[in-house]
Amino acid sequence: MTNQQNIFDENLINIRKKRIINKFPSFLHSLAINDLKDRLVEIGDEFLETLVVGPFAKHWAHNISQKKTRTIDDKEFLKITPSSQDLIISALHLHSVNDPISKLVQMRFGLKKTGIFMGYAFGEKSLYELRKSLEYAELKNFGGISPRVNPMIDTPTYGSLLSRSGFKFCVTDKLHFEIEYQDPWDLIIDLKSIGETNCLIKRSKRTLTKIFLNDVLNFYKNNFSSSKIHNSYIATFDIICLTGWHTKPKSFA
């Protein structure tokens, strides 16, 4: 494990994930899964041994239809047999781990020499509108800003993390979505459905009053209305795709 200060309350994350683990995750996971399926077709290799890592790993495994797929939850230390997997998938969870390099190194050790890692994580512009609305309400009601939305890593940094973890032929790219919601509260419901609400160790402990919440909603509605659909509001999501090989692709072998 790298020497760093933890950002996320992993106990709280685990509690929230356990509450929803058997529920069908939101469409955000479906967007990432559909992109993954397209990329696997483009790669064209046959993956005899596939491992999916993350709280919703079983749902991902069910949808990607690889020959032999097993799943493991997102634990600090992953139980992966070294050099055993042709493909390892990180299922939209690296953005909320305290030590992403440790996770990436563990997954790389689990790959065969010609194995490939493919990971998905939320990126830097995700929840921009909600973040700004909360900041406005914090300043208005409390005179300062407390973090209420998890910080996100940008695309170049994810690429650096891949390289520092030992992967070769690294590629990172971004899927950008502007989702339309009839009400900002629907966004909050979606975030709760995948356990993506505030899990920061230094999160604010202040009680959210009705006045505070109304300020958040009013700012959101006044500043982030959709230009496409009347009486709807946008929420930005960046989903980063990370790809890296243990040593080299099969075509180079």
Image (cartoon, rainbow, N blue to C red):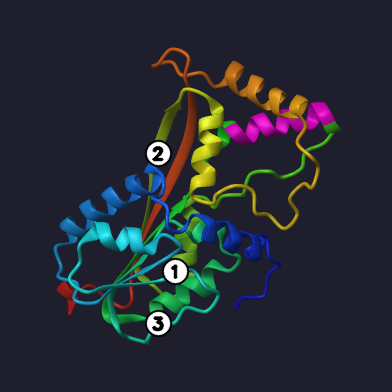
Judging by the rendered image, the residue that carries numbered circle 1 is 163
Q: Is residue 27 magenta?
A: no
CA separation in Å, label 2 and label 1: 23 Å
Residue 64 is situated, as x and y percent measured from the top left of the image, at 24, 59
Tag nearer the camera, 3 or 2: 3
CA separation in Å, label 1 and label 3: 20 Å
Residue 35 is situated, as x and y percent measured from the top left of the image, at 28, 49
Judging by the rendered image, the residue that carries numbered circle 2 is 176
Magenta span main SS: helix
CA separation in Å, label 3 and label 2: 32 Å
User: In percent of the image, x 62 and y 76: which residue is there?
Assistant: 2
Residue 150 is situated, as x and y percent measured from the top left of the image, at 62, 49
Tag nearer the camera, 1 or 3: 3
Q: Give the class, few, some or many, for how many residues have Cα within 10 Å of label 2's Cα (few <14, many ≥20).
A: some
Above-or-below relation of 87 to 24: below
Quick one: label 1 or label 3, which is nearer the N terminus? 3
Q: Give the class, few, some or many, for how many residues have Cα within 10 Å of label 3's Cα (few <14, many ≥20).
A: some
Whether residue 124 is visible, yes or no, is no
User: In percent of the image, x 44 and y 64: which residue is there?
Assistant: 54
For the record, the magenta segment spans 130-141
Q: Is residue 140 magenta?
A: yes
Whether residue 203 is visible, yes or no, is yes
Mark 1 touches mark 3? (CB < 8 Å): no
- Residue type, numbered disc 2: His
Tag nearer the camera, 2 or 1: 2
**Which image quadrant for residue 14?**
bottom right
Q: Secondary structure at mark 2?
A: strand
- Residue type, numbered disc 3: Ile
Image check: 51 left or right of 93?
A: left
Judging by the rendered image, the residue that carries numbered circle 3 is 80
Quick one: label 3 or label 2, which is nearer the N terminus? 3
Tally of marks: 3
